[in-house]
Image (tube, grey):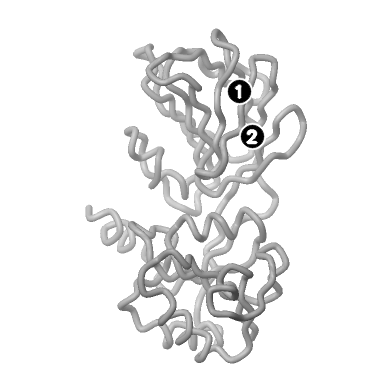
Amino acid sequence: MKFSIVANIKQENIREILKKVIGFVGDFELDKASANFLGLKGVEIKDLSGDVIISLGGDGTILHILSQINKPILGINFGGVGFLNELEPDSDIFTAIDNVINKKYFEEKLHRIDTYLNGLNVGTAVNEIVLHTSRVAKIQGFEISTNGKLIDSFRGDGVIIATPTGSTSYSMSVGAPIIYPTMKSNIIVPMAAYKLGSRPLILPADYEISAKITGHPEAVMVIDGKEEIFIKGEDKLEFKASKSPASLIRFNKNFFDRLRNKLRL
């Protein structure tokens, strides 16, 4: 089995663990940033050819990888909460890698959302798409529809369109419910809506969602915390279920263990 290894080289003590993982796995390749960090040759993330990607970093590292390539990922957390990661730095990392080699794991398939701006696919979200006012402390108008039918029209700070995976992230922080990760659904979450009736709404994943801004002619869209995309009033936004789910390597099937441990419930 060939492993592709991607590390967040800004993390403390990452050099030591990166060298140990390379020495253990045998057949490997590195992304360019990790390779340069060690004085080796690497490839762009989008060109990684391994059977499994080992991610050494936080959830942001996994999201960064998935924004460029879709392969099974074994996440080792060197970030904060690390909800997407399966292992912590003090875990028996090498036994886990050995279990991957011997196929003693399962793949958790995660629903993703393709985002279209005026018919052009501008990115795929594992966690969420955030549509937000471009002006600090100024409310913006939003209209949200599904399958051609208006769901809600409100003024507020913004709206989050999240996957079940994203329901433990930004969506949760603004009061929306947590959704079991393998459920085929999306959640629409108004942010600071100036309207009592605007509340989080869970929809089947195969319902197409569309959005437009009203009032002020400009807003900002962010996919999985990446770069900002400026949206104008005449722009057409559509959100559709991706045909290629993300795949995370898991050893423990108990989602509620992870929920308690990661979120300290």
Disc number placed over residue 211 in the picture, else none: 1
The quadrant the N terminus occupies is: bottom right
Q: Which residue is mark 2?
A: 239
Q: Nearer the viewer, residue 152 or 118?
A: 118
Mark 2: secondary structure? strand
Q: Is residue 164 above or below residue 120?
A: below
User: What kind of residue is marked 2?
Assistant: Phe
At 70% from the left edge and 34% from the top edge, which residue is drawn?
116
Which of the 4 image quarters holds residue 11?
bottom left
Q: Position of residue 251 (x, y in %)?
A: 43, 74
At 43% from the left edge and 14% from the top edge, which residue is drawn?
139
- Relative to 221, 46 lies left or right: right
Mark 1: secondary structure? strand
Which of the 4 image quarters holds residue 247?
bottom right
* Residue extending furthest toward the right: 119
> Is label 2 in contact with label 1 (beta carbons under 8 Å)?
yes
Q: Is residue 83 above or below residue 225?
A: below
Mark 1 crowd level (few <14, some 14–19, many ≥20, 10 Å Cα): many
